[in-house]
Image (spheres, grey):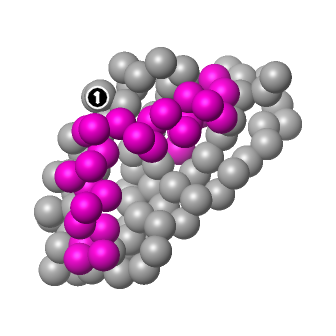
Amino acid sequence: MAHVTIIGTVTAKPETRAELFDLLTRQVAPTRQEKGCINYDFHVDASDPCCFVFYENWRTQADLDAHLEMPHLKPLFLQLDRLLACTVDIRHLTMLSEMA
């Protein structure tokens, strides 16, 4: 079975950018330790400092589903309506090349 790849885009309201950045930054280390996490890479859009992007690869869909239930995500999930300018955009991808 192929791994699961997603790109998640999270856009902050300008006034909550710093707070959201802090919350998102704190997700990286614990997520990278989760079972099934191949990579979890955090980016900011080069032309929009309020737009954050995660590139993620997971061993299975079950691993990704378990990730979304992790306690370390709760502080973020409880504040999304207040922090975000729009809904989270998650794109599911199918890799055509071999993994590096």
Nearest to the observer: residue 65 or residue 96: 65
Was residue 79 drawn as part of the magenta stretch in this picture? Answer: yes
Q: Quadrant of the C terminus?
A: top right
In the image, 3: left or right of 68?
Answer: right
Was residue 80 drawn as part of the magenta stretch in this picture? Answer: yes
Picture residue at 41% right of the left edge, 22% below the top: 34
> In this picture, is 45 found above or below 34?
below
> In this picture, is 47 found above or below 65?
below
In the image, 39: left or right of 4?
Answer: left
**Mark 1 neighbour density, 10 Å: few (under 14) some (14–19) many (20 or more):** few
| Secondary structure mainly formed by the magenta segment | helix
Q: Position of residue 51 (x, y in %)?
A: 39, 67
Q: Which residue is mark 1?
A: 29
How many numbered marks appear?
Answer: 1
Amino acid type for the residue under numbered disc 1: Ala
Picture residue at 71% right of the left edge, 23% below the top: 99
Q: Position of residue 5 (x, y in %)?
A: 65, 40
Picture residue at 23% right of the left edge, 66% below the top: 79
Q: Position of residue 19 (x, y in %)?
A: 14, 62
Query: Residue 92, can we see it?
Result: yes
Q: In the image, which residues are magenta? A: 55-83
Nearest to the observer: residue 78 or residue 44: 78
Picture residue at 25% right of the left edge, 61% below the top: 78
Nearest to the observer: residue 48 or residue 57: 57
